Image: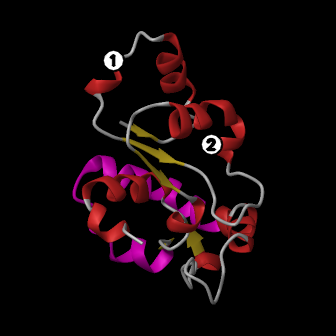
Amino acid sequence: ILMLGPPTNLARAIDSDLLDQSGISHVYLMGGELTHQQLDLNFRTDRASARTIIEESNIPTTVIPIQTCAQTIVTESYLERLDCPSVAACALLPKMKQQIKLMPRFVNQAVKKRCTIDGPWRPSPNLDSGFIPWDLVALLAITHEEEFIE
């Protein structure tokens, strides 16, 4: 199971005993942060649910924190090289271009404060000129798990 937002529904199912946990091989939570500063939006929105899944369930869980996601940035130059393989991908280009303009000013500055320049969680050098593809990084953590081992 991949949780891209607050893990409320999964935690409720676990708490209700209606969910057979043995049928779930792994849970991936996009959320958390490694510097013990303020939690990210997903965990801050529902701390109790994140705690239920991580600490109280018997399900193997991988947390994909802010610092992991901040290592990948989509920039304008990347979009210029993007060959639209489908109408759907081309339809997303205006929204992605908007994200490139807005996110460095509104989100990435807060993310940068949670990353260490000299430590293990270095952000992308392009953090000031693009957006973090949060969901894509989480998906890659599942499909290419070997790339995300400390």
- Does the magenta-highlighted stretch encompass residue 80? yes
Q: In the image, which disc is placed on residue 143?
A: none
**What is the magenta range?**
75-101
Q: In the image, 91: left or right of 8?
A: left
- Taking 10 as reference, is 91 above or below it? below
- Taking 47 as reference, is 17 above or below it? above
Q: Are marks 2 and 1 in contact (CB under 8 Å)?
A: no
Screen quadrant of the N terminus? top left
Could you say whether the residue bearing mark 1 is in a helix, strand or loop? loop
Residue positioned 45% across, 80% down in the render:
77
Q: In the image, 108: left or right of 37?
A: left
Q: x, y (%) of residue 33? A: 63, 59
Q: Nearer the viewer, residue 144 or 85?
A: 144
Dot 1, crowdedness within 10 Å: few (<14), some or many (≥20)?
few
- Taking 12 as reference, is 60 above or below it? below
Mark 2 vs 1, N-terminal side: 1
Q: x, y (%) of residue 6? A: 58, 35
Screen quadrant of the C terminus? bottom left
Q: x, y (%) of residue 39? A: 71, 51
Q: In the image, 57: left or right of 66?
A: left
Residue positioned 68% across, 46% down in the render:
41
Q: Which residue is mark 1?
A: 20
Residue positioned 55% across, 58% down in the render:
65
The amino acid type of the residue labelled 1 equals Asp
Q: In the image, which disc is placed on residue 42?
A: 2
- Residue farthest left in this picture: 85
Could you say whether the residue bearing mark 2 is in a helix, strand or loop? helix
Between circles 2 and 1, the one closer to the viewer is 1
Q: Nearer the viewer, residue 120 or 93?
A: 120
